[in-house]
């Protein structure tokens, strides 16, 4: 079963006054590559969340985004009374310019180093967030995988259509190949007979047979046809598999090998009918190469 590399999934949960939202997006990539966007206080979970993604997604550029909104009282920072008092004492003891009065801005005081401190249970909040985010990753990845599977089905339909074009044209080439040698033999005999008749000479049958054998050997595409048939059969097996596993890179390599054999056939044969079929085969292979870039 082929899966596309593009997909999207999201999941959210509201617990203990905190709203958690997580989304996963994936795009085409030669290998697995993860990008993480986490709140500052949850950066320590990056490695574990990436490991969870890697366990579920084998190929693609994946971006995981987490947003948290805490509306509970636990989100409030604690004012360090000792530090604040110390700042106020220093302000009061500072000499004021003549005729001026020092005005204390509460907002500026709270922004001084050490006045506001993170909630004492920050470690507990991270621990709680970890358990929740792992569940959300599972749900979001399930959605993403379902979407990638649906797109993969459409991808398989297109790959199979191009595979059928290759197979049908390949059979026509295989049927035409023996006729090419027969046609060459017939044309060669006619030309030689005409030349010898005008010159009044004779040619030994062995010489004619040798010339035909050389041409047949030079234009023989039997091995290339057999290898290309084998590649097409393997390609068909891969896209028909029921098991979900990453085969995109295998399909890409297989398409390159099919194109190699098609090019060799084209260079060996000078027959117009075969050349037309090979052009169609190469066109279908190019479309396959383009499509498998999106296969996991």
Image (tube, helix red, strand yellow):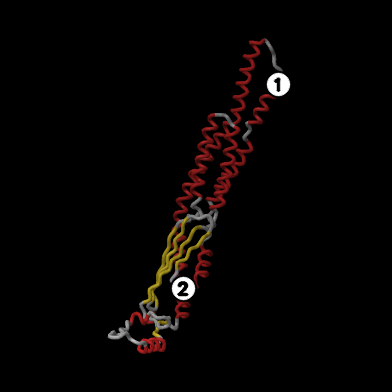
> Which mark is first along the chain, 1 or 2?
2
Q: Secondary structure at mark 1?
A: helix
Marker count (numbered): 2
Q: Is residue 61 above or below residue 86?
A: above
Residue 200 in the image, given as x and y percentages of width and height: 67, 10
Mark 2 Cα within 10 Å, few/some/many (few <14, many 20+)? some
Q: Residue at x 60, y 21 (%)?
A: 187
* Distance CA(mark 2)–CA(mark 1): 85 Å
Above or below for 160 versus 68: above
How dense is the environment of label 1, judged by Cα within 10 Å: few (below 14), some, or many (20 and up)? few
The residue wearing badge 1 is 207
Front-lying residue, 46 or 82: 82
Label 2 vs label 1, nearer the camera: 2
Instruction: Examine the rendered structure and indicate whether residue 188 appears above or below residue 114.
Output: above
Q: Residue at x 70, y 21 (%)?
A: 207
**Farthest residue, direction left:** 99
Location of residue 79 (image quadrant): bottom left
Q: Is residue 85 left or right of residue 57?
A: left
221 up-or-down from 160: above or below: above
Which element is circle 2 on?
A: helix
* Residue 89 in picture, x, y percent from top left: 38, 89
Q: Position of residue 202 (x, y in %)?
A: 69, 14
Name the residue beneath numbered marker 2. 42
Mark number, residue 107: none
Seen in the image, is 156 located left or right of residue 218?
A: left
Q: Nearer the viewer, residue 19 or 122?
A: 122
Q: Are marks 2 and 1 in contact (CB under 8 Å)?
A: no
Q: Residue at x 51, y 60 (%)?
A: 33
């Amino acid at each position: 079963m082929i899966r596309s590399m593009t997909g999207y999934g999201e999941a959210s949960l509201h617990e203990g006054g905190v709203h958690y939202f997580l989304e996963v997006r994936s795009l085409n990539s030669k290998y697995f590559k993860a990008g993480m966007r986490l709140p500052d206080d949850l950066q320590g979970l990056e490695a574990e969340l990436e490991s969870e993604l890697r366990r579920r997604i084998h190929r693609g550029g994946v971006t995981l985004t987490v947003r948290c909104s805490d509306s509970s009282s636990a989100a409030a920072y604690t004012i360090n009374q000792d530090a604040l008092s110390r700042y106020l004492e220093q302000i009061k003891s500072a000499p004021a310019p003549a005729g001026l009065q020092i005005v204390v801005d509460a907002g500026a005081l709270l922004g001084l180093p050490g006045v506001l401190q993170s909630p004492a249970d920050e470690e507990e909040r991270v621990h709680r967030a970890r358990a929740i985010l792992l569940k959300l990753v599972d749900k979001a990845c399930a959605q993403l995988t379902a979407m990638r599977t649906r797109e993969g089905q459409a991808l398989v339909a297109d790959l199979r259509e191009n595979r059928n074009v290759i197979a049908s044209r390949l059979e026509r080439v295989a049927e035409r190949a023996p006729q090419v040698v027969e046609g060459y033999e017939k044309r060669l005999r006619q030309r030689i007979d005409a030349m010898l008749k005008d010159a009044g000479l004779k040619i030994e049958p062995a010489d004619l047979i040798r010339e035909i054998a050389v041409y047949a050997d030079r234009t023989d595409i039997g091995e290339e046809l057999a290898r290309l048939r084998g590649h097409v059969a393997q390609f068909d097996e891969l896209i028909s598999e029921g098991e979900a596993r990453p085969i995109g890179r295998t399909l890409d390599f297989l398409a390159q090998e099919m194109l190699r054999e098609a090019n060799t056939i084209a260079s060996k044969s000078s027959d117009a009918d075969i050349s037309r079929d090979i052009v169609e085969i190469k066109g279908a292979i190019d479309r396959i190469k383009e499509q498998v870039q999106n296969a996991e």
